[in-house]
Image (cartoon, helix red, strand yellow):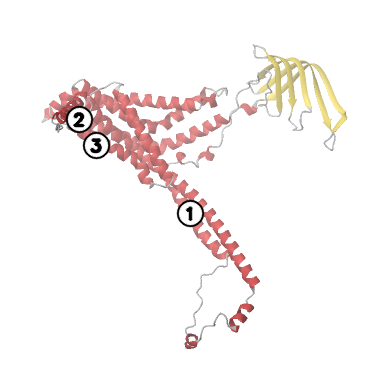
Amino acid sequence: MRLNVVLMKKIDILVIRSFIGPFILTTCVVVFIFLMRFLMLYFNDFVGKDLGYDVFGKLFVYFSLITVPIALPLSTLLASLMCFGNLGEYSELTAIKSAGVPISRVLFPAMIFALGVSVFSFWFNNTVNPWANLKGYSLLYDVKTTKVTLNIKEGIFYKEIPGYSIKVVKKFSDGKTLKGVTIYNHSQNNGNINVTLADSGKMYTMYDNTYLVFELFNGCNYIDYRSNDASYNETQFVKNGFKQNKMVFSLESFGMKRTDESQFKYHEFMKNINQLNEQADSIKKDIKKTLRSQTTLATNLYNFQFKEYPVDTSKAARERKPIKSGSWIAEKMKKSVTVTSDEEAFETALNQAKNLKDQFNTTVDIIKSKKRDAIKAEVEKWHKFTMAFACFVMFLIGSSLGSIIKKGGFGMPVLLSITFFILMYVLMQLGDKYAKEDIWPVLLGVWMPDFILLLFGVYFLYKATNDARLFESDIYAVYFDKLKSLWNERKFFKPKKVLT
C-alpha cells in the first residue's frame, strides 16, 4: 500500500512538472502573439509621435494584461497537448498504464492545476481585467489623439501649428537650414492679411522641445489692415523689411494630454460583476419607468375614453319601434347633426392618433436601445464565467487528444490547438451576436461554445480511456480495405444479363 502511495506521488510530480513548464512557456508565447497583433493594429497611431519609452511600456503592460483572459484557454489547451503528447511519445504514459494506473488517475493532478487556472482566470477577469481595460484604452485614446511630431516638408503648407500656415521651398539635409520661407498668420481668423516672406532661415527648438524658433534672414512682413466696416482700406498697408527676424511658436499642442479616466467607465469592459449587475438592474428599472410614464402621458394628453354608453333596458324602450330611414323624423334628425363639427372631431381624433403612434414608436426605439445595453452588460458578466470555464474545457480536450496522438513538440499540438481555438472563437462571436440582437437568450449565446467544446472533451476522454487509435492511419486503412472488399464482392456477385 505504501509503495502504491509513493508511486502515485512520483507520477503526480512527473505529470505536474511536465505540464507547468509548457504552460508557462505557451502562456508567454500566446500573450506575445496577441500583443504583436495589437501593435500591428495600432501601428499607424504610434508612428512619428515621439511618445517616449514610458508610454510604450505602459501600453504594453496594460494590453498584455488585457490579453491574458483569452490567452489562458489557448495556452491550457496547447500545454496539455504538449504534456501528454510528450508522455505518450516517450512511452512514459504506456508504462504508467501498464502498471495498472487508469488514464483518469494520470490526468488528476493536471486537472486540479487546470481547475486552479480556471479560478485564477475568473478572479483576473473580474478584478484585474476591468482595471487594465480602463487604463489601457484611455491611454490608447490619448495616444491616438496626439499630434504627429513637427515634420515640415518641401513645397507643402504645414498647418499643424494652431493659427499659422508655413511653407518652405527647400529643406537642407541638416534638417535646420531652410530656403524660401512663407509664413501666414491666421491667429486672428481674418484671412491672409498677415504674411511673412524670407529668403532663407533656420528652424530649431528650445526649452526641451516646448518652443519652435524660426530664425529668418532677408525678408519682409506684409500686413493689410481692415477698416471698421470689415472692408479693406488701401491706405492701411504696412510693409516691414528685415535682415534677421525670429518667430517663436509654442509646441504645447503637440504634447500628449491625459483624459479623465472617468469618461471611459461607462463601457462594459471596464466593470466587474457587481457593477454590471447594477447597470443591468438600473436599465431594467428605467425601462419600467419609461413604460409607466408613457402610459400616464398618453392618458393625460389625449382625450380618448374607453367608456360604454348606457343601454336603455326599460319596457318602453323595448316596445319602441325603430325609426325608418326614409321617414320625415329620420330626415329631421339628420338635418339637426352639424356636419362641420363631425369633420373637425374626426380630424382631431386622427391627428391625436398619429401623434400617439409616433410617440409610441419613439418610446419603443428608446426601450430597444436600453434593452440592448442591458443585454451587453449581461453578456459581459457571463463572459467572466465562460472564459474561466473554457480553461477547464480546453484541458479536457488537450489532455485527451495528447494521450491519443502521442506526439509532443510544437507540430501536431499547435495545429490542433489553433483548430479548436478558432472553433471556440467563431462560436463565441456567433453566440454573442445572436444574444446581443435578442435572437437567442443570453445564457444560450454565451454558454454555447463551452457546451459544444465540453462535448468534444468528454468524447475524447472516453476514447483516451479506452485506448482508441483515432489518429493512426492504419486504422482507417483497414476500414478502407473492408469497404473496398465489399465493393468488389458486390461487383463479383452482380447477376449477369440473360441473352435472349
Using a 10 Å C-alpha cutoff, classify the residue at mark 1 as few (fewer than 14 neighbours), some (14 to 19) or many (20 or more).
many
Q: Name the amino acid, label 1.
A: Ile
171 relative position to 130: left or right:
right
| Residue designated by label 2 | 106
Where does the image place residue 15, in percent across and percent down from the top left? 23, 26
Using a 10 Å C-alpha cutoff, classify the residue at mark 3 as few (fewer than 14 neighbours), some (14 to 19) or many (20 or more).
some
Q: Name the amino acid, label 3.
A: Val
Q: What residue is at 55 percent from the left and 37 percent from the top?
A: 260
Looking at the rendering, which quadrant does residue 169 occupy?
top right
Which mark is first along the chain, 2 or 1?
Answer: 2
Is label 1 or label 2 in front?
1
Relative vertical location of residue 386 with respect to residue 61 in this rendering, above or below: below
Is label 3 or label 2 in front?
3
Would residue 346 be seen by someone viewing this image from the given angle?
yes
Q: Secondary structure at mark 2?
A: helix
Where does the image place residue 433, in percent across and percent down from the top left? 42, 41
Would residue 380 be seen by someone viewing this image from the given angle?
no
Q: Secondary structure at mark 1?
A: helix
Q: Residue furthest top?
A: 173
Q: Name the amino acid, label 2.
A: Val
411 relative position to 219: left or right:
left
Where does the image place residue 122, in percent across and percent down from the top left? 36, 38
* Quadrant of the image containing the C terminus: top left
| Residue designated by label 3 | 458
| Residue designated by label 1 | 287
Q: CA distance from mark 3 to mark 2?
A: 16 Å
